Every structure is written in C-alpha cells, then in structure tokens.
Image: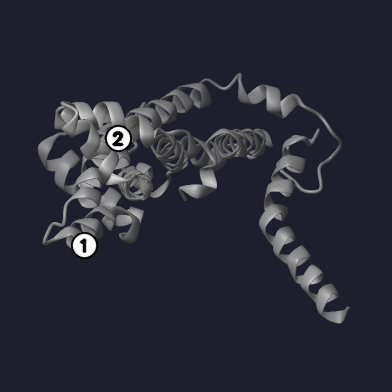
Amino acid sequence: MTSRFLSAFVLSIVMLFLIGPFLIIVAASLSAGDNLAFPPQGLSFKWVLKVFEIESFRASFAMSMMLAILGTLAALAIGIPVSYALARYKMPFGETVRTIVSAPIIVPGIIVGLALLRYLVIPLGFNISFALFMAHTALVLPYAVRVVSASMVNLRGDIEEAAVLLGCSRLGAFSRVVMPSIRGGILAAFILGFVTSFNQVPVSLFLSGPGVRTLPIDMLAYLETTYDPSVAALSALLAFMSIGIVFLAERFLGFSRYV
C-alpha cells in the first residue's frame, strides 16, 4: 500500500512538473488584465482574439509554416534515399554516415546558426530566407533519416526482390513497393520534422533579419516592447496545434511506433 501511494505521489509530481507550465500559460492567456500575470486577473478571450489582429504575428506565422513545410520536404527528399542505402546495403562507412547525418542534433543550434551566418550570409551574401531554409532542412534531416530508416529496416527485402524478379525495374520497385509500404514512417517523419522546424529558436535567432522572422523569434521581439497576455495566448494556441497534430498522427498512424 505504501509503495503504491509513493508511486502515485511521484507520478503526480512528475505530471505537475510537465503539465504545470502549460496550464499556467493557458490561464495567463485568458486573463482580463492588461499585463501578463498569473493568477489571471479575471477571465476574457480578448487576448486570444488580439493574436489574429497583430500583423507581425501573421507574417511570421506564414514564414514559419513555409520553412517548416519546405524544409521538411527537402529533408525527406534527401533522407529517404539515404535511409534506403543504409538499410539495404552494407557500406564500409555506414556508421560514419549515420553520425554525420545526426550532427545537427548533437551540435548546439547556436553554433549551427552562427556558422551559417558567418560563412554563408555575411561573406557570400546568401539571402536570409534561403539561409533559414538550408538551416531548417539540415536540422530536420536527422529526424527524417532516423524515422524512415526504422520503417525501412522493418520492411522485408524479399518483397522488393520479388517485384524485380517479376520484371519491375529497381526504380519501379522502389516507387511501387517500397514507398507505399513505408508511407506511415514518411508521414511520421514529416510531422516530427514539421513540429521541430516550426518551434526552432537558436538557429532562427541568428538568421533572422529585417522583414524575415520566424514566429518564435517574433514572439521574443514582441516581449521586448510589450508585456501583455497576447504572447501567452499565442503560445497556448501553438501548443494546442502541436498537441492536435501529434494526437492525430498517433490516432491514424501509430506515431509512437516510429519515434
């Protein structure tokens, strides 16, 4: 009985630690006061509605969506062939390739952002938007390779070989047999990459410029001059969006099987 009570108590503390900040932000976003505070000063939805009226939030949201979608698609375009090669062929430097591909996860984002700013944007004059696209693609690539590789390893190779023996080319077997068989893993990799890219802060902080800001960076800049609950309202909306995406992915794809 004591052991069960202790386990329930520890679980409650852990859940409060994980969910508590989210509940505080949601409560602060519904405050009727003019300043960001907890506990809220009354209840109102005015700050939630104001989020949609702020032009900079709309522009930066569009930028974040574009980067997340295009960056994740580019990472998948690179990651799927890499995953196929690593799963199907015994390459002498396979583990080295996996380590290199995982480098954006291992290396702190601040270093990646500073390196891109120093060696691409400043000396070569790269467009900031294009530099952001490259950075987000590189940051999402490890997730694409890892998740798709897990699906590729679980796919029986003799199915593909049977298609080849029946007259299908290697490319045809890949497109008609392999790709449909791992579509769940590809969609899971896309969702994971999208959420990771959309919420990216350190790299985007270095590569943001006039008129080019992602939503998290725009929220930081907004807090420097204004301290109202609209940022809390936007944070709550983004959290609900991420939770909804992951919930739907788990419901229809079995997301936890791939991550």
Identify whether 247 is placed above or below 107: above
| Circle 2: residue type | Val
Identify whether 58 is placed above or below 192: above
x, y percentage for residue 61? Answer: 48, 27
Asked whether the residues under the numbered discs 1 and 2 touch, taking CB atoms below 8 Å apart as contact, a structural biologist would say: no
Neighbor class of circle 1 (other Cα within 10 Å; few <14, some 14-19, many 20+) is few
Q: Secondary structure at mark 1?
A: helix
Neighbor class of circle 2 (other Cα within 10 Å; few <14, some 14-19, many 20+) is many
Q: At 67% from the left edge and 34% from the top edge, which residue is drawn?
A: 233
Viewer-side label of 1, 2: 2
Badge number at residue 95:
1
Q: Nearer the viewer, residue 45 or 54?
A: 45
Please report whichever mark, 1 or 2, sits nearer to the chain's N-terminal start. Answer: 1
Q: Nearer the viewer, residue 196 or 213?
A: 196
x, y percentage for residue 86? Answer: 22, 51
Q: At 62% from the left edge and 34% from the top edge, which residue is drawn?
A: 244
Q: Secondary structure at mark 2?
A: helix
**Residue 6 located left or right of residue 102:** right
Numbered marks: total:
2
x, y percentage for residue 245? Answer: 56, 34
Q: Is residue 103 visible?
A: yes
Say which quadrant the N terminus sits in.
bottom right
Residue named by callout 2: 178
| Circle 1: residue type | Glu
